[in-house]
Image (cartoon, rainbow, N blue to C red):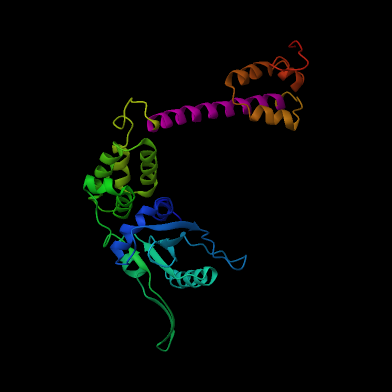
Amino acid sequence: MVTSTHEASHRIFQDRPELLTPVFDLLGVPMSAKASVSVLSADVTEIQPLERRVDTVLRVEPSDGDAFLLAIETQGRRDNRKATNWSYYVAYLHEKFRLPVLLLVTCTDRSTARWASGPFTCEVRGWATQSTHPLVLSPDNVPMITDRRTAARNLAMAAFSAITHSKNPKAAAILEALFGVLRETDPLTAVYFSGLLEIGLGDTPARQTWRKLMGFTNFFPGRGTLLEKTFLEGEARGEAKGEAKGEAKAILRFLEARGVSVPEDARDRIANCTDLGLLNRWLDRTPHVKSVDDLFAEDPGATTPQAEA
């Protein structure tokens, strides 16, 4: 089952390619400091009824070597079916793109990580036809970034550290370092990482800690920042949209109850209206109108104004 933690743990690699250099350092895989990274389709389905999908597939072109593919999977628990799935993913991507493939698995607990490291072998009587050796990121090899200066150097790595260690009672120290950096960064970056961690920390105490830290009572309070405005305007738009939808439904119910025919174009006009003042006027007219033409008669731009009944 796909979870919020699952989504954030691999999606960050798509959005923040600067994460790859420190990750390859952790895994002991030589990598140049500069590389071109592009996201490829994660669909590895060959026959329509059988759908297979890798979480993330990146094409990496190092400045000092040949291109390769990085297939990224996030695993929350042991699943023996993955032994064959992962081998299939690697073989299929290798054949489709004609490039060597590395498989990277991210885990938030140590026991799953130990299992995920494999190798997963297809063999008969000691003869191996295929063997898959995933690279694994887990609490065992992802550092806990609790230093604010270290977090500032690579926010993506610090965020990934927080997600990976989200079940650790000491995760709050990582979040506090991130919070300190985000208070001083640009609002768009703050919006991205605050949202990423909101979903990536999953159903853990760390998520509650993050919510408290990022509460609008103590994060850029009253300074009119983009982060604050986006939140407040979004709340207002959501409330207004909900109220408009309720008014439209009420109008349609009243008209139907009175036996007034409502053509499809008129129904769409009412349902899609977001002007609360206009909706209120229509609602006031519903007890008196004999047709939808009467409902719209006095609206600006009406072609045939009529007196209300």
- Left or right, residue 264 beside residue 97: right
Residue at screen point 29% across, 67% down: 28
Q: Is residue 60 visible?
A: yes
Q: Residue at x 45, y 28 (%)?
A: 233
Does 193 appear above or below 128? Answer: above
Please tell me whether the stretch drawn in magenta is mainly helix, strand or loop: helix
The residue positioned farthest toward the bottom in the image shown = 125
Q: Residue furthest right?
A: 304
Q: Position of residue 225 (x, y in %)?
A: 37, 29
- Horizontally, residue 125 falls left or right of residue 171, namely right
* Residue 257 percent across, percent down from the top left: 71, 26
Q: Is residue 12 left or right of residue 174?
A: right
- Of residues 214 and 188, the one drawn nearer to the viewer in this rendering: 188
Whether residue 1 is visible, yes or no, is no
Residue bounds of the magenta highlight: 227-256
**Location of the C terminus (image quadrant):** top right
Residue placed farthest to the front in the image? 64
| Rendered residue at 35%/54% (across/down) | 19
Q: Please tell me how many numbered marks the rendered image carries.
A: 0
Residue 250 forms part of the magenta stretch? yes
On screen, 146 above or below 51? above
- Is residue 245 magenta-colored? yes
Vertical comparison of 16 with 74: above or below: above
Residue 109's x, y, as percent?
A: 31, 60
Which quadrant would residue 46 be assigned to in this image?
bottom right
Which image quadrant for residue 106?
bottom left
Task: Please state the horizontal and vertical placement of residue 122, each as a whole percent of the image.
Answer: 44, 80
